[in-house]
């Protein structure tokens, strides 16, 4: 039976009999994970464990022993979202503000391959698309992401056009796409993400205010009112 779990780097003794991974996950979720947090990584004996989140959190019932090295990472979805938003906002701003000299270079370029600076922007744009997909999955349902989704659609079309132009080694067309389809939407995205960050900060602040109130039971309320 499992003796200890490493949770966010801290070794925690397990005071109940736990025989398999499924029982361990259930115990951690019930006793050690706050309502506004979630398990984001599971590692058993050095191997990452996949799980099914289609409905209930489900992992394979792998047997555990007193020598099993079980490690879990617990995070706040809001914290992860804010971290991703911050990276994406900075990346969008950098891309939008640095395209003009890259476009000029591409317009004059005669070689068979992208110049290193342009190739770097292309990679950053690809990363921006991936982060944007990820952050939209993380956003709280109370956050209005209409504008972000619209910009995602615009930038996806731009990325498709950019990929085609690069594939054809048409550097003038690549330069046009960067200036006409990427520059302004990237800057607009950076501004929109700043607004989204503010909304999430407000949601987190509201939850932090509400949590102590929820922890006050009827006896605590009565005792405090008698003071």
Image (spheres, grey):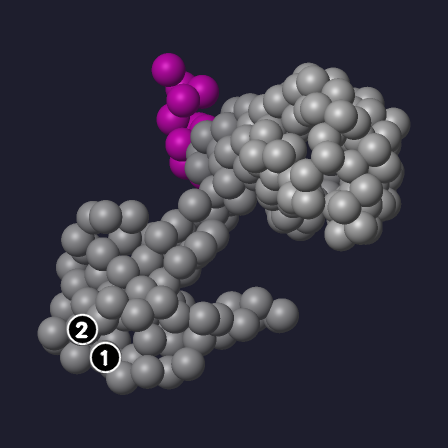
15 and 24: which is toward the camera: 24
219 and 169: which is toward the camera: 169
Percent x, y of residue 120: 58, 36
Q: Which residues are magenta?
A: 217-227
**Distance of label 1 from label 2 (alpha carbons):** 6 Å
Q: Which quadrant: the N terminus? A: bottom left
Q: Which quadrant: the C terminus? A: top left
- Mark identifier at residue 68: 2
Percent x, y of residue 104: 75, 21
- In terms of secondary structure, where does tag 2 sit? loop
Name the residue rendered at 40%, 22% in the picture: 224
Looking at the image, which residue sits at the far left? 67
Mark yes or no: residue 53 visible. yes
* Residue 51, above or below 181: below
Name the residue rendered at 40%, 58% in the picture: 41
45 left or right, relative to 173: left
5 left or right, relative to 195: left
- Mark identifier at residue 152: none
* Residue 143, above or below 190: below
* Residue 149, above or below 107: below
- In terms of secondary structure, where does tag 1 sit? loop
Name the residue rendered at 22%, 56% in the picture: 6
Task: Identify the residue under disc 1.
Answer: 64
For label 2, count other residues whose C-alpha is less than 10 Å away and answer few (under 14), some (14-19) or many (20+): some
Q: Report the number of numbered marks.
A: 2
58 inside magenta stretch: no
12 left or right, relative to 43: left
Name the residue rendered at 46%, 30% in the picture: 212
Do the numbered discs 1 and 2 sit on residues whose CB atoms are within 8 Å? yes
* Residue 25, above or below 121: below
**Quadrant housing residue 132:** top right
Dominant SS in magenta: helix
């Amino acid at each position: 039976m499992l003796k200890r779990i490493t949770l966010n780097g801290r070794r925690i003794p397990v005071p109940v009999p736990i025989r398999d991974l499924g029982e361990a996950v259930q115990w951690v979720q019930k006793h050690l994970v706050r309502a506004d947090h979630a398990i984001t990584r599971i590692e058993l004996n050095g191997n990452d464990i996949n799980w099914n989140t289609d409905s209930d959190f489900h992992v394979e019932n792998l047997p555990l022993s007193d020598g099993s090295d079980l490690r879990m990472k617990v995070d706040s979805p809001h914290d992860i979202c804010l971290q991703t938003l911050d990276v994406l906002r900075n990346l969008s701003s950098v891309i939008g503000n640095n395209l003009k000299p890259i476009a000029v270079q591409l317009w004059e370029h005669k070689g068979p391959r992208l110049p290193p600076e342009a190739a770097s922007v292309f990679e950053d744009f690809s990363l921006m698309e991936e982060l944007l997909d990820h952050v939209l999955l993380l956003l709280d349902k109370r956050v209005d992401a209409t504008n972000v989704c619209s910009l995602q659609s615009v930038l996806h079309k731009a990325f498709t056009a950019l990929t085609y132009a690069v594939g054809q080694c048409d550097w003038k067309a690549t330069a046009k796409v960067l200036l006409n389809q990427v520059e302004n939407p990237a800057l607009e995205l950076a501004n929109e993400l700043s607004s989204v960050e503010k909304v999430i900060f407000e949601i987190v602040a509201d939850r932090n205010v509400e949590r102590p109130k929820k922890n006050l039971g009827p006896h605590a309320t009565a005792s405090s009112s008698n003071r």
